[in-house]
């Protein structure tokens, strides 16, 4: 291999990285009100202050936090149960893993379409219930999507993230169960006690990382809340997008300030996670 | 507790690992499962512990068949080769774990852990984490944890193989000391013949999923059942011959022995060959290898196609290229029926 080959091979990711970092920096600069093309040249925190005082923003923030926290906690719990079931039944490789991977590669947009075609008032279940005579019209089917409790979005994230949590933590849990789980059973612990005393606590690094990834992702992602969310309040990324496509281009710093706040919140989440894990390791 | 294996067969991934194993270990006895890698020793240990299920046969513990008893209720505790201490617990928590899961209160678990740490000579280590300990210390903790589980049978899966020679000797002594004190029926899996000979009341030699011989260390060394067992302990030169009317007749020598008539292989180990210098000697010293407190000599016959080995003290005056004659020590010869 030529000495230059590694550098050539790494070029695409470097280029993409530069593009991404440039975009983030550009957005942050714009959030401080500096867009010379639109005659905005005063650097100011006003946009941030204004947004932080706006009830719409606070409602959106609350909605996004609610969606991401509830969906991530449920996905982690159910994902861990799925992982444990796979580990204890010996399905840690082969076909079952392919099924899990398949669920991971299906895009969120497709998941939203699945949910609409299954759970909406025009969906399969509503039609089935109507055909069976359980409801007198399709409109009687309970409204599960586009609601203020964000049921549809949370369901969509859970559907996508349970397999992710399982895939992410399966290898670690399986290897712990094979060695230390086996040792604890040999010392007198039942399978259940073994799981709660040994396998689960030692699998927590992978489960914790999976939780952080899905929490930050679901907090900052746009597609599911856009397709399945209520008219008001909108999730933060959707609200930021609306600000971004505002006809008055001078409105853009508001969108960027919202993105800046999303960035700060996700970084804070990551920072907190880092502090908790390093503190645990030092103990 | 007394342990018995009756016709145990184990098949893993369509391969027969254990073939109709029968073995009886008396209460408080220390036995070794000795044999080369892959002969099924560890599988046998895991079968006793219920981690691997046998295809056929029964495991009988204290007179009761335990085939349907789950691993966690068997009290057949393994000290694993890789020790498997729990990294998220302190040393005391590791040792107290078998008690904790039985519902014993925290203080009593800790008291017992400290008591056992004293037994394994690790006083003051109770609050240490596993990653702060050396290999030898980790092994002592693993041993203490196994004893805390009050095993009916203690199963040691090559526990000394990762230790250096000096540490290994200390650990062997400690294990024997504790085994005698607590009178625990113990099975040691090892491929180290010296370890098996030193530590065991009996040795079960395993080869290819079967027990070739099960007897005392002295008997297995001096009267191996076949050439596989004999060669594993100490290799030598085989001479084919026949015993007739209590006399072994062969091309090399004829000698009086007290054995049944029949064809035999006579194994001449290095300790059975005593060379002495002679100008008209039949053997030529072709190699002299220093082994610490003695030398191993390789001797080639100048008359027959025969090579012998001999172990001589380090003050020997025999040199490479010398001509020697040999005296065969009758008591050290081993006769294996063909």
Image (cartoon, coloured by chain):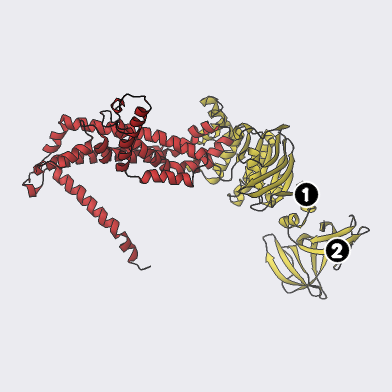
- Rendered position, B264 above or below B1: below
Q: Is residue B251 left or right of residue B12?
A: right
Q: Which chain is the one coloured red? A: A
Q: Quadrant of residue B302?
A: bottom right
* Badge nearest the viewer, 1 or 2: 2
Q: What colour is chain B? A: yellow
- Chain to which the residue tagged by mark 2 belongs: B
Q: What percent of the width, then of the height, locates residue A103?
A: 38, 43
Query: In the rendering, at what x and y percent does residue A31 appear?
Result: 15, 42
Residue B236 visible? The answer is yes
**Compared to B305, does B93 lie above or below?**
above
Instruction: Looking at the image, tell me whether mark 1 or mark 2 is earlier in sequence order.
Output: 1
Point 17% across, 45% down: residue: A28
Which residue shows up at 65% across the image and 41% down it?
B47
Q: Which mark is residue B92?
A: none
- Chain under numbered label 1: B
Other-residue count near label 2 (Cα within 10 Å), few / some / many at <14 / 14–19 / ≥20: many
In the picture, measured across the screen, residue B37 lies left or right of residue B24, that is left
Q: Which residue is mark 1?
A: B218
> Camera-side residue: A85 or B69?
A85
| Image position, residue B35 (x, y; %) | 68, 51
Label 2 sits on residue: B241
> Would residue A277 be visible to someone looking at this image?
no
Where is residue A198 drawn, in percent x and y? 49, 35
Please report the residue visible at 36 percent of the width from the left and 33 percent of the height from the top. Answer: A73
Instruction: Tell which of B122 and A178 is nearer to you.
Output: A178
Q: Secondary structure at mark 1?
A: helix
The quarter of the image holding the C terminus of chain B is: bottom right
Q: Is residue A50 left or right of residue B178?
A: left
Q: CA distance from mark 1 to mark 2?
A: 25 Å
């Amino acid at each position: 291999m030529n000495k230059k080959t590694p550098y050539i091979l790494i070029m695409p990711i470097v280029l993409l990285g530069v593009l991404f970092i440039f975009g983030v920096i550009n957005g942050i600069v714009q959030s401080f009100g500096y867009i010379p093309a639109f005659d905005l040249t005063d650097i100011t925190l006003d946009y941030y202050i204004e947004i932080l005082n706006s009830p719409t923003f606070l409602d959106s923030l609350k909605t996004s936090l609610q969606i991401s926290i509830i969906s991530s906690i449920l996905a982690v719990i159910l994902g861990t149960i799925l992982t444990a079931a796979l580990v204890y039944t010996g399905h840690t490789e082969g076909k079952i893993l392919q099924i899990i991977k398949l669920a991971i590669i299906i895009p969120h947009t497709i998941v939203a379409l699945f949910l609409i075609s299954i759970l909406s008032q025009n969906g399969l279940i509503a039609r089935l219930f109507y055909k069976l005579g359980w409801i007198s019209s399709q409109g009687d089917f309970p409204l599960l999507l586009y609601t203020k409790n964000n049921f549809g979005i949370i369901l969509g994230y859970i559907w996508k993230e349970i397999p992710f949590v399982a895939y992410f933590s399966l290898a670690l849990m399986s290897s712990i169960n094979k060695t230390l789980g086996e040792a604890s059973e040999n010392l007198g612990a039942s399978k259940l006690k073994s799981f709660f005393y040994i396998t689960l606590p030692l699998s927590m690094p992978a489960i914790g990382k999976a939780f952080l990834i899905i929490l930050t992702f679901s907090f900052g992602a746009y597609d599911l809340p856009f397709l399945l969310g209520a008219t008001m309040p909108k999730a933060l990324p959707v609200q930021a997008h609306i600000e971004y496509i505002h006809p008055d281009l001078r409105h853009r710093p508001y969108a960027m300030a919202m993105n800046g706040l999303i960035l700060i919140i996700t970084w804070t989440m990551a920072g907190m996670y880092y502090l908790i894990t390093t503190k645990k390791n030092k103990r | 507790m007394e342990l018995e294996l009756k016709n145990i067969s184990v098949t893993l991934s369509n391969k027969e690992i254990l073939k109709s194993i029968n073995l009886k270990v008396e209460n408080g006895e220390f036995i070794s499962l000795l044999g080369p890698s892959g002969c099924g020793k560890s599988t046998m240990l895991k079968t006793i512990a219920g981690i691997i299920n046998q295809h056929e046969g029964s495991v009988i513990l204290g007179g009761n068949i335990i085939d349907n008893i789950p691993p966690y209720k068997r009290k057949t505790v393994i000290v694993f080769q890789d020790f498997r201490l729990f990294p998220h617990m302190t040393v005391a928590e590791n040792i107290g774990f078998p008690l904790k899961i039985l519902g014993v209160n925290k203080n009593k678990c800790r008291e017992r852990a400290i008591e056992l740490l004293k037994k394994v000579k690790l006083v003051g280590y109770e609050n240490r984490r596993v990653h702060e300990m050396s290999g030898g210390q980790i092994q002592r903790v693993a041993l203490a944890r196994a004893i805390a589980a009050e095993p009916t049978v203690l199963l040691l899966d090559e526990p000394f193989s990762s230790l250096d020679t000096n540490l290994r000797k200390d650990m062997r002594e400690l294990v024997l000391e504790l085994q005698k004190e607590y009178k625990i029926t113990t099975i040691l899996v090892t491929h180290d013949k010296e370890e098996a000979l030193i530590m065991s009341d009996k040795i079960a030699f395993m080869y290819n999923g079967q027990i070739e011989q099960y007897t005392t260390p002295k008997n297995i060394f001096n009267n191996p059942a076949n050439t596989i067992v004999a060669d594993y302990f100490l290799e030598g030169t085989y001479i084919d011959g026949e015993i007739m009317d209590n006399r072994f007749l062969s091309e090399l020598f004829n000698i009086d022995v007290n054995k049944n008539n029949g064809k035999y292989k006579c194994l001449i180990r290095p300790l059975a060959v005593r060379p002495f210098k002679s100008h008209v000697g039949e053997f030529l010293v072709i190699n002299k290898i220093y082994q610490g407190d003695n030398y191993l000599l390789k001797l080639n016959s100048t008359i027959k196609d025969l090579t012998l080995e001999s172990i001589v003290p380090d003050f020997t005056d025999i040199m490479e290229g010398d001509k020697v004659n040999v005296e065969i020590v009758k008591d050290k010869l081993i006769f294996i029926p063909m």
